[in-house]
Image (tube, grey):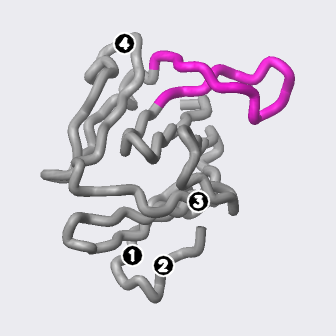
Amino acid sequence: KGVTTALRIRPGDRVFEVTTVAPATTGDAYDEPSTVNPGAGNQEVLLPGMGTPVGGSGGGAGGSFSVTLDPAIQIEGLGINGEDWTDDAVAEVRFYPNGTCDELTLVLLSERQERRNIWLEVVTGLAFMETDIKEFHAR
């Protein structure tokens, strides 16, 4: 509560990591983040067959939580705040204490060529999913 949380995505590795962001010392909300104890935020949120938790503290103090998607699932597209991050090594989406978040659009592709579009509603930080490719949100 009361801290900015970051979702770091490594598209090439299919890794998602949740960390808290150190308070800005210069008043700039986009200062370089650092990993701090995310406390109770370290909850495993996986659908069966979706991925494997890696590293982290498993819910205890002193680390971040990360998950690797199953090799059968690829990140086909990743957009943050209107920019394409699909080919970048690391991308970061921030969730702010007031409940808002950065804009995120993510397209996952399964080995059966099924696509899922996941996006965040920036005012509430809620995630939504679409399966109809005609309704996908643009990156």
The magenta stretch is: 19-37
Residue 131: image x %, image y %? 34, 78
- The residue that mark 2 highlights is 136
Q: Earlier in the sequence, mark 1 or mark 2?
A: 1
What residue type is disc 3 on? Gly
Report crowding for label 3: few under 14, some 14 to 19, many 20 or more residues within 10 A (C-alpha). many
Tell me the crowding category of disc 1: few under 14, some 14 to 19, or many 20 or more residues within 10 angstroms, Cα based.
some
- The outermost residue toward the left is 48
Identify which residue, 74 or 44, lies in the foreground.
74
Q: Quadrant of residue 15?
A: top left
- Residue 47: x, y in percent? 20, 52
Residue labelled with disc 3: 79
Q: Callout 1: helix, strand or loop?
A: strand
Q: Earlier in the sequence, mark 4 or mark 1?
A: 4
Q: Amino acid at mark 2?
A: Phe
Asked whether the residues under the numbered discs 4 and 1 touch, taking CB atoms below 8 Å apart as contact, a structural biologist would say no
Residue situated in front as seen by the camera: 58 or 132:
132
